[in-house]
């Protein structure tokens, strides 16, 4: 298994006990249904013309590739990869690549749709896409993952491009995987174009043309939302407590930045289990433990707790940063936090949203909270396009102001229309997409 080099590649998604809501049918099916439901609610609010609703109701392209890869043993295995391109009215398709077991086309459809909205909400000139490969990366060596990545890139080559569709890291992928993807793509184009196509992916390591700060960007953006929520709710964050589900890229950076602000992270969980310490867990040390062992379990300063106990933990802030469909009705009744900041995409069922609203628990929605990733991806793309070098202070200060501005816009829209923050975020994104269609018309 490949742990040391890929600290954030820790997932074993369908493992478990840890995903009890799958009884509602295939969870990925529900994900695209749920995302479409959020859009439908926003569309009703805005009286969206029927033809635009029809266009946005389906992705523009759904690509499936099957490709062979040589395993370390010398045998060959066939892998299935996906890329869904939802909409490009605002700019090139943009979205993550997932490496996870049981990845489905439908899951990619739901996530690609959310990306269209996330980019529009942040006023970034990108559309929405999502893809990945259906396999469990924890069961493969680094060399096998490199070959899978290079072969996947090659299989997709005519369907992605630096001005057409730009992948980024997501669940089970990281900067190293983006660097391999970029390198493969660069080596398939004409030599004269090689350096012009670096921006085929974002989320690369800085030495490959990535931005300092990109790795932390999604967590940093999530914390900005928590800070804004605290400011408007007149809550002093120092001394408050947080629980974080998922301790890969998004969860670990959110934890580290929250602890810098003086919060105490009392519970953390991942695909293998949950740990608790009422005195606070050190996110830096837990992240080191994950890097060495692949999980938070067995961290010596935390005692093991059940998944139910994790959701019931007495804390002020809950950050789901693992994967989709984790907060159902049962969890919504257990949660003690005052606010939930959705670092993961689609962690909450609509039925749970209703219970949380009734219980007075604020939900800061995913397309706002985790939009720091795509925002900094856009900066990276611009940096590559202009052959510039941005420094980390510049990246993070531009990210902070983008997050503050978008948070204020969502909050104002929600207050004006007397709607919840999730509907406000979807409606604001939709308003921007609708305006683009109204200006351009539908060709021919
Ligand atoms: P990651 O692979 O780095 O980490 C995922 C974490 O979730 C790991 O700790 C893993 O053990 C845990 N996990 C997986 N399945 C679980 C389960 N069933 N129960 C509990 N924990 C589980 O992934 P990431 O990049 O941090 O992404 C996490 C979430 O954030 C995903 O929903 C992703 O789509 C979303 N997101 C990521 C980014 C980004 O920049 N990486 C940007 C926007 C949104």
Image (cartoon, rainbow, N blue to C red):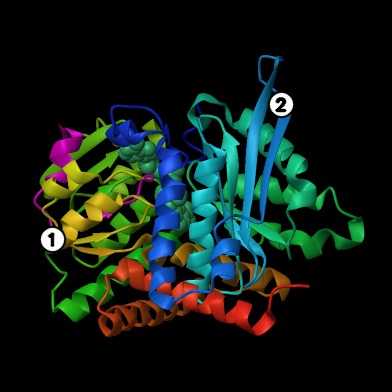
Residue, x 56% and y 65% (percent of image)? 377
**Magenta range:** 302-324
The correct choice, above or below, for 294 with respect to 318 in the image is above
Residue 354 included in the magenta stretch of the image: no
Residue, x 42% and y 46% (percent of image)? 31
Density class for disc 2 (Cα within 10 Å; few <14, some 14-19, many ≥20) is some
The correct choice, above or below, for 182 with respect to 444 in the image is above
Residue 155: quadrant of the picture: top right
Density class for disc 1 (Cα within 10 Å; few <14, some 14-19, many ≥20) is few
Q: Position of residue 395 (x, y in %)?
A: 50, 74
The correct choice, above or below, for 320 with respect to 26 in the image is below
Relative horizontal placement of residue 269, taking residue 71 as reference (left or right) = left
Q: Position of residue 26 (x, y in %)?
A: 42, 34
Residue 318 included in the magenta stretch of the image: yes
| Towards the viewer: 302 or 340 | 340
Q: Position of residue 367 (x, y in %)?
A: 41, 63
Report the residue marked by disc 2.
69
Callouts 1 and 2 close, C-beta under 8 Å: no
| Towards the viewer: 27 or 155 | 27
Relative horizontal placement of residue 172, taking residue 285 as reference (left or right) = right
Report the residue marked by disc 1.
358
* Mark 2 residue CB less than 8 A from any atom of ligand 1: no
Alpha-carbon span between mark 1 and mark 2: 51 Å
Asked whether residue 184 is in view, the answer is: no
Residue 163: quadrant of the picture: bottom right
Residue, x 61% and y 33% (percent of image)? 145
The mark that comes first in sequence, 1 or 2, is: 2
> The residue tagged with tag 2: helix, strand or loop?
strand
> The residue tagged with tag 1: helix, strand or loop?
helix
């Amino acid at each position: 298994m490949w742990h040391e080099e890929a600290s954030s590649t820790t997932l074993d998604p369908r493992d478990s006990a840890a995903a009890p809501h799958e009884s509602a049918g295939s969870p990925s099916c529900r994900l695209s249904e749920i995302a479409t439901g959020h859009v439908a609610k926003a569309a009703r609010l805005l009286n969206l013309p029927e033809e635009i609703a029809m266009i946005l109701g389906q992705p523009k392209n759904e690509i499936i590739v099957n490709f062979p890869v040589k395993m370390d043993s010398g045998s060959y295995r066939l892998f299935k990869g996906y890329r869904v391109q939802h909409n490009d009215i605002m700019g090139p398709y943009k979205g993550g690549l997932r490496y996870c077991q049981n990845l489905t086309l439908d899951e990619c459809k739901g996530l690609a749709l959310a990306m269209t909205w996330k980019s529009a909400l942040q006023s970034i000139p990108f559309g929405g896409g999502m893809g990945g490969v259906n396999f469990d990366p924890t069961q493969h060596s680094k060399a096998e993952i490199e070959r899978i990545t290079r072969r996947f890139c090659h299989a997709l080559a005519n369907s992605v491009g630096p001005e057409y569709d730009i992948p980024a890291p997501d669940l089970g992928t990281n900067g190293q995987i983006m660097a391999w993807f970029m390198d493969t793509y660069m080596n398939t184009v004409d030599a004269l174009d090689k350096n012009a196509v670096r921006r085929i992916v974002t989320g690369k390591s800085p030495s490959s043309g990535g931005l300092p700060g990109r790795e932390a960007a999604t967590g940093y953006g999530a914390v900005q939302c928590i800070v804004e929520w605290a400011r408007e709710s007149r809550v002093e964050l120092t001394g408050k407590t947080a629980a974080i589900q998922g301790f890969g890229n998004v969860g670990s950076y959110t934890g580290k930045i929250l602890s810098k602000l003086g919060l105490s992270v009392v519970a953390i969980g991942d695909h293998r289990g949950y740990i608790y310490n009422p005195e606070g867990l050190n996110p830096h040390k837990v992240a080191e433990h994950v890097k060495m062992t692949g999980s938070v379990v067995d961290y010596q300063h935390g005692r093991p707790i059940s998944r139910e106990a994790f959701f019931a933990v007495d804390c002020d802030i809950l950050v789901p940063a693992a994967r989709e469909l984790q907060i159902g009705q049962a969890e919504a009744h257990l949660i003690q936090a005052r606010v939930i900041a959705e670092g993961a995409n689609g962690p909450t069922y609509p039925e749970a949203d209703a219970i949380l609203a009734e219980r007075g628990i604020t939900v800061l929605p995913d397309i706002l909270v985790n939009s720091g990733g795509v925002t900094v991806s856009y900066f990276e793309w611009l940096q590559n396009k202009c052959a510039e070098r941005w420094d980390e202070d510049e990246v993070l200060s531009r990210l902070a102001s983008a997050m503050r501005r978008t948070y204020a816009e969502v909050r104002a829209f929600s207050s004006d229309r007397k709607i919840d923050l999730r509907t406000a975020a979807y409606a604001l994104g939709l308003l921007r997409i609708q305006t683009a269609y109204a200006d351009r018309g539908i060709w021919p």
